[in-house]
C-alpha cells in the first residue's frame, strides 16, 4: 500500500486540520478556512474571475500576423540570428535547429517538439518554419489584454497567453441582455416569453454566455482562445485548459476539479518548480494518482513533508483552496503593433500590404475599447541598424484602417525611408470619439464622429494641406490665404417666439420646417446686386503684356488665352518688405527682400475681367485672378 | 436632411394613437407622411435661395435640395459669384457648406465679402492630390517606388468625385459646391454620365443642395437644373473726367436651360459688383 509506505497515518485527511497546522506554508490572501466549508456555504461572496487562455501562444501570435499560415503545418524555432528570421541564417544551420513550438497541424503529421527542422521537414510536407517573434507575441498579448479590458477594468496579464479579469458583478449587467435575447428567441419561436424566476437564467448560464462573448472578441483579433470562469484564478485557468467556454459555479469547484486529469496542472512545464515538476509528476504517477480529486484527498501535511512546498501548492489547487489575488494593471495608454519582416522591404506597395494588416488589428483593438486613433507614431528599423521615427498627425480621430494607411503612405511618399525597412512598429494614441446630441430645431450639421472620419478620409485623399477652412491671411498681398482646421460651431436654434396670447411657439426661421415659407417670398428677401467674387489663379499664370506709352496694358497673350484689352483699371501698387508680407506689418525688419507689384483690372475681348499683376522687380506679368 | 424627416415620420406614425400629445401641426404631419408614403426623398419645395430676387423668381425660390444643379458658363461669367451667393445664404442660416475646388481657385476674401461664413465652409483642395503626384515624380526620392494604389496618384477628376461622395455620405451639409472649372487656359472638365449618376444619388441620399460649376453642361439628365450664364458686360467708371478708371462689376445674365422641377427657358439679369454697398439704386 502506498499510504503505508509513505506515512504511518492515512494520507487522506480533512482540510480543516491542515489549515490549522502552523508548520505548513500560509494560505494565500483571500483563502477561506476550509474548502469544504466554502463548498457548503454558497452565501459567501466570491469574486468571479475569468481566465482567457490562448494555447500555444507563440504559434497563435505567429498565425495572427500571418493568417495564411493557419492552414499549414508550422513550427517555430529560436534562432540566435535575431529578428531577421531565417534569412540571416544559413540553410544548414536552420536544418539543425530544434523545433521549439509545433502547431497542431504539424503535430498530426508526426512533428514533435525537439525535432530538428530537417527531420520535421521530412515528416511534414509543406512545413512552414518561422523564427519566434517576441514583437508579435507582445502585440498579441496586448491584444488579449484589450479584450479583457473591454469587459472589466480589473485585468491581470499572466504568463504567455493568459489573461485574468474580474467578472464580479458583470453577470447582473449581462442578465438583462440574456433575458432580452431569450425573449426575442421565444417570440421568434411563437411562444410567450415569461420572466418568472423559474425561467430566469442562472448565473452559470450567464457567465458561460459572457465567456462565449469573450471568445468571440478574441476571435475578432485573430486568435483562438479558451475561457474559464471560476472563483479563483487557478480554477479558472484549469477550466480554460479544458477548452471552450466554461463557467464553474461558486461552491462547485471541488466537484469540477475532482475529475480533472493531473496533466492539466502542467507539471512538466516547470512553472515555479523547475525540473522538480517532472519528478513530481513521476512520483504522483508512481503513487497511482491520475486525477486532481485523488491528489486532493491526500494528507497535505504528509505530502508536504515528503514532496515539498510545490506539492502542497498543487494540493491546494486541487482542493480549490488556492486563491491568488488578482493584481490589476493599468490600461495601456497606446496601442502598438509590431512586425519583424523576414526580408527588407524597399517599396511602399509591399509596406502598405504589411501595414494594412497591422492597422486593421490596431483598429479592431481600438474598437473593442471604444476608442479612436488620434495620432500615429511610426518606427521603422532600416537596413544597417538605422531607425526612422516619424509621427503622422490625423485631422480627426478615426477608426478607418484604410484612411490611416493612406495617411501613413502619404507621409512615407513625402519623405521616403533612407533604406530598406526590416521592422515596422505602429503605435496609435487613442482618443475618445466625440459625440453630440443634434438639435431638432437647428439646421442639420454633420455628426462629430462622422465629420471626423470624413475629414481624415479627405486628408488621406488630398493631403493634410488640402482640407480645412481657407481664410485670408493677415498680409498685404490680396491672394494670401491660410488653412485652418474645419470645426464649425453648432448652429443655435433661436429662442421660441411669443404669440399674441403669450404662449411660446417654436417658430424658427432657419429651421427646415420653415424653409418652404421662406423661399415662397424670394422677392421680399432677395436683392438685385451681389458681390463679385474672384477666382484666384494659384500660382499666378505668367503672361505677356503689351503696354501703351502710359504703361497701361493694351494686349495680353498667355499660353492658352489672350486678347486685346477693352477696358482697364489701375494700377494699384503694393510695395512691402517680406516681413510686412508675412506678418502683416508687425515685424519691421529692414533689408529683407520684399515685393513691389502693380495690379490692374483688365477686360479682354472675350468678355472676361482679369486681375493682372506686374512684378516691378523682374518686369514680369502674371494673371492673379479672374473676376467670376 | 434625409434622416431628420424620416425619424419624425416614424415618430408620428408610431404615436398616432396618442394624437393629443403630439406637438407637430397637422400640416407638418401631412407633409412628412407624404414623404414617407411616396418614397420621395427630395421635396420640390425644399429649396435653397440664392438671395438674388430675379434669379429666385425664375427658379421658384431657389435650387432644389437633394438634387444636382449645374451652373454653366465661361470663365468670368459669374459662376463663382452665384455659388458664393448660395453659400452665403446657406451659412447665414447656420448650415454647413463644402467647396470642392479643382483648381485651387477659392478666394476666401471675396467669398467672405459675399456674406458667407468661412468657418462654416469646408474647403477641399482636390487639386492637391494631382499636385502631390507631380511633385513626387520630380523629387529625387522617387526611386523609393510609391504604391500604385496610393491616393496621391489619382490625379484628375476622380479625387473630386471621391471627395464629393465622402462629404455627401457624411451628411449634415446643406450645400456642396463642386468646382469643375480648371486652371486658366486649361481643358474643360466633364463628368462621365456614370459619375453624374453617382453624384445625383449621393445628393439625394444626403439631402444637400449640390452645385456643379462647369464650362458646359456636363451632368446630362442627372442635373435637375442647368443654369447657363450668358455673356457679361463689364462696367468701368471714372469718378471724374480724366480720373483713373475703376472696375465696378459685371452685369450677369442667366437663363434656365433645363429645369426638371420647374419651368425652363426663363432668364434673369442681375449685377455683381466689386463693392455692392456703393451700388446705385437701379441696375
Image (spheres, rainbow, N blue to C red):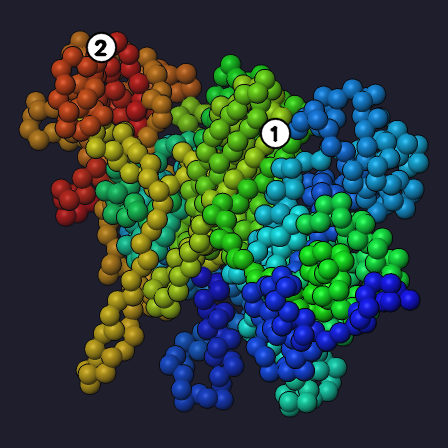
Residue found at x 34% / y 64%: A442
Say which chain tag 1 marks.
A
Q: Do the residues indicated by labels 2 and 1 lie within the same chain of the protein?
A: yes
Residue found at x 62% / y 47%: A141
Q: Is residue A225 above or below residue A38?
A: above
Q: Which residue extends farthest front?
A: A8
Residue at disc 1, secondary structure:
strand
To which quarter of the image does residue A496 belong?
bottom left
Residue A33 visible? The answer is yes
Left or right: where A395 falls relative to B268: right
Relative depth, front residue between A136 and B179: A136
Residue A268 is situated, as x and y percent measured from the top left of the image, at: 79, 49
Residue A376 is situated, as x and y percent measured from the top left of the image, at: 48, 39
Q: Is residue A230 above or below residue B232?
A: below
Residue found at x 93% / y 36%: A123
Residue identified by numbered label 2: A617
Distance from the alpha carbon under mark 2 to that under mark 1: 52 Å
Residue A198 is situated, as x and y percent measured from the top left of the image, at: 68, 89
Q: Is residue B55 above or below residue A4?
A: above
Quarter of the picture containing the C terminus of chain B is top left
To which quarter of the image does residue B148 belong?
top right
Residue found at x 49% / y 16%: B139
Relative depth, front residue between A609 and A170: A170
Q: Say which mark, if any, is on residue A523.
A: none
Say which chain tag 2 marks.
A
Residue identified by numbered label 1: A423
> Which label's residue is closer to the chain start, 2 or 1?
1
Amino acid at each position: 500500500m502506498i499510504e503505508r509506505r509513505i506515512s504511518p497515518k492515512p494520507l487522506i485527511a480533512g482540510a480543516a486540520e491542515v489549515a490549522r497546522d502552523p508548520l505548513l506554508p500560509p494560505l494565500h490572501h483571500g483563502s477561506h478556512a476550509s474548502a469544504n466549508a466554502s463548498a457548503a456555504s454558497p452565501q459567501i461572496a466570491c469574486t468571479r474571475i475569468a481566465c482567457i487562455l490562448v494555447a500555444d501562444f507563440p504559434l497563435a501570435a505567429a498565425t495572427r500576423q500571418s493568417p495564411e499560415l493557419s492552414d499549414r503545418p508550422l513550427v517555430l524555432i529560436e534562432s540566435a540570428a535575431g529578428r531577421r528570421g531565417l534569412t540571416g541564417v544559413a540553410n544548414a544551420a536552420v536544418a539543425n535547429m530544434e523545433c521549439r513550438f509545433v502547431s497542431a497541424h504539424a503535430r498530426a503529421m508526426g512533428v514533435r517538439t525537439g525535432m530538428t527542422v530537417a527531420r520535421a521537414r521530412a515528416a511534414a510536407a509543406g512545413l512552414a518554419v518561422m523564427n519566434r517573434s517576441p514583437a508579435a507575441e507582445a502585440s498579441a498579448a496586448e491584444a488579449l489584454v484589450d479584450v479583457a479590458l473591454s469587459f472589466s477594468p480589473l485585468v491581470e496579464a499572466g504568463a504567455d497567453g493568459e489573461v485574468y479579469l474580474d467578472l464580479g458583478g458583470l453577470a447582473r449587467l449581462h442578465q438583462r441582455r440574456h433575458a432580452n435575447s431569450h425573449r426575442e428567441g421565444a417570440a421568434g419561436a411563437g411562444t410567450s416569453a415569461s420572466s418568472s424566476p423559474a425561467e430566469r437564467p442562472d448565473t452559470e448560464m450567464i457567465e458561460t454566455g459572457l465567456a462565449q462573448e469573450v471568445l468571440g472578441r478574441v476571435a475578432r483579433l485573430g486568435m483562438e482562445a479558451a475561457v474559464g470562469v471560476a472563483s479563483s484564478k487557478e480554477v479558472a485557468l484549469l477550466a480554460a485548459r479544458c477548452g471552450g467556454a466554461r463557467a464553474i459555479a461558486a461552491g462547485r469547484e471541488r466537484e469540477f476539479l475532482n475529475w480533472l486529469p493531473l496533466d492539466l496542472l502542467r507539471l512538466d512545464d516547470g512553472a515555479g518548480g523547475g525540473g522538480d515538476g517532472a519528478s513530481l509528476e513521476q512520483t504522483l504517477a508512481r503513487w497511482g494518482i491520475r486525477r486532481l480529486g485523488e491528489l486532493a484527498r491526500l494528507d497535505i501535511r504528509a505530502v508536504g513533508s515528503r514532496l515539498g512546498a510545490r506539492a502542497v501548492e498543487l494540493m491546494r489547487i486541487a482542493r480549490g483552496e488556492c486563491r491568488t489575488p488578482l493584481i490589476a494593471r493599468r490600461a495601456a495608454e497606446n496601442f502598438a503593433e509590431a512586425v519583424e519582416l523576414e526580408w527588407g522591404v524597399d517599396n511602399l506597395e509591399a509596406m502598405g500590404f504589411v501595414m494594412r494588416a497591422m492597422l486593421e488589428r490596431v483598429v479592431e483593438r481600438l474598437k473593442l475599447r471604444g476608442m479612436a486613433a488620434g495620432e500615429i507614431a511610426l518606427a521603422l528599423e532600416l537596413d544597417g541598424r538605422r531607425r526612422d521615427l516619424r509621427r503622422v498627425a490625423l485631422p480627426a480621430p478615426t477608426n478607418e484602417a484604410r484612411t490611416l494607411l493612406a495617411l501613413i503612405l502619404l507621409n512615407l511618399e513625402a519623405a521616403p525611408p533612407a533604406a530598406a525597412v526590416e521592422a515596422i512598429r505602429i503605435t496609435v494614441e487613442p482618443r475618445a470619439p466625440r459625440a453630440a446630441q443634434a438639435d431638432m430645431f437647428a439646421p442639420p450639421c454633420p455628426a462629430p464622429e462622422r465629420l471626423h472620419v470624413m475629414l481624415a478620409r479627405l486628408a488621406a485623399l488630398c493631403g493634410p494641406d488640402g482640407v480645412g477652412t481657407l481664410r485670408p491671411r493677415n498680409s498685404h498681398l490680396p491672394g494670401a490665404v491660410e488653412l485652418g482646421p474645419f470645426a464649425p460651431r453648432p448652429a443655435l436654434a433661436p429662442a421660441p417666439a411669443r404669440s399674441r396670447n403669450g404662449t411660446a411657439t417654436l417658430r424658427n426661421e432657419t429651421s427646415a420646417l420653415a424653409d418652404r415659407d421662406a423661399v415662397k417670398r424670394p422677392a421680399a428677401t432677395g436683392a438685385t446686386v451681389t458681390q463679385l467674387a474672384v477666382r484666384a489663379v494659384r500660382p499666378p499664370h505668367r503672361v505677356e503684356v503689351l503696354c501703351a506709352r502710359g504703361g497701361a496694358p493694351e494686349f495680353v497673350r498667355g499660353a492658352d488665352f489672350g486678347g486685346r484689352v477693352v477696358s482697364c483699371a489701375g494700377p494699384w501698387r503694393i510695395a512691402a518688405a517680406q516681413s510686412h508680407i508675412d506678418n502683416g506689418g508687425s515685424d519691421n525688419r529692414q533689408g529683407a527682400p520684399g515685393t513691389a507689384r502693380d495690379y490692374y483690372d483688365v477686360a479682354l475681348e472675350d468678355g472676361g475681367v482679369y486681375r493682372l499683376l506686374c512684378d516691378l522687380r523682374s518686369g514680369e506679368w502674371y494673371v492673379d485672378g479672374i473676376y467670376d | 436632411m434625409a434622416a431628420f424627416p424620416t425619424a419624425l415620420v416614424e415618430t408620428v406614425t408610431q404615436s398616432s394613437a396618442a394624437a393629443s400629445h403630439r406637438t407637430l401641426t397637422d400640416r407638418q404631419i401631412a407633409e412628412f407622411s407624404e414623404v414617407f408614403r411616396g418614397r420621395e426623398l427630395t421635396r420640390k419645395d425644399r429649396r435653397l435661395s440664392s438671395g438674388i430676387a430675379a434669379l429666385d423668381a425664375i427658379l421658384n425660390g431657389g435650387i432644389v435640395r437633394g438634387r444636382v444643379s449645374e451652373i454653366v458658363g465661361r470663365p468670368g461669367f459669374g459662376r463663382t459669384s452665384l455659388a458664393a451667393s448660395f453659400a452665403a445664404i446657406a451659412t447665414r442660416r447656420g448650415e454647413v457648406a463644402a467647396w470642392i475646388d479643382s483648381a485651387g481657385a477659392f478666394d476666401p476674401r471675396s467669398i467672405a465679402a459675399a456674406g458667407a461664413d468661412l468657418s462654416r465652409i469646408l474647403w477641399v483642395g482636390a487639386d492637391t492630390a494631382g499636385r502631390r503626384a507631380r511633385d513626387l515624380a520630380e523629387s529625387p526620392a522617387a526611386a523609393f517606388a510609391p504604391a500604385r494604389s496610393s491616393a496621391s496618384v489619382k490625379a484628375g477628376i476622380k479625387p473630386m468625385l471621391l471627395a464629393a461622395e465622402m462629404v455627401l455620405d457624411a451628411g449634415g451639409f446643406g450645400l456642396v459646391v463642386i468646382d469643375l472649372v480648371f486652371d486658366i487656359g486649361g481643358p474643360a472638365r466633364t463628368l462621365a454620365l456614370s459619375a453624374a449618376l453617382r453624384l445625383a444619388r449621393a445628393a439625394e441620399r444626403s439631402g444637400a443642395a449640390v452645385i456643379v460649376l462647369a464650362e458646359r453642361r456636363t451632368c446630362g439628365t442627372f442635373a435637375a437644373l442647368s443654369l447657363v450664364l450668358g455673356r457679361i458686360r463689364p462696367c468701368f467708371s471714372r469718378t471724374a473726367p480724366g480720373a483713373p478708371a475703376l472696375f465696378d462689376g459685371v452685369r450677369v445674365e442667366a437663363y434656365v436651360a433645363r429645369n426638371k422641377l420647374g419651368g425652363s427657358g426663363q432668364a434673369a439679369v442681375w449685377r455683381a459688383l466689386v463693392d455692392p454697398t456703393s451700388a446705385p439704386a437701379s441696375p
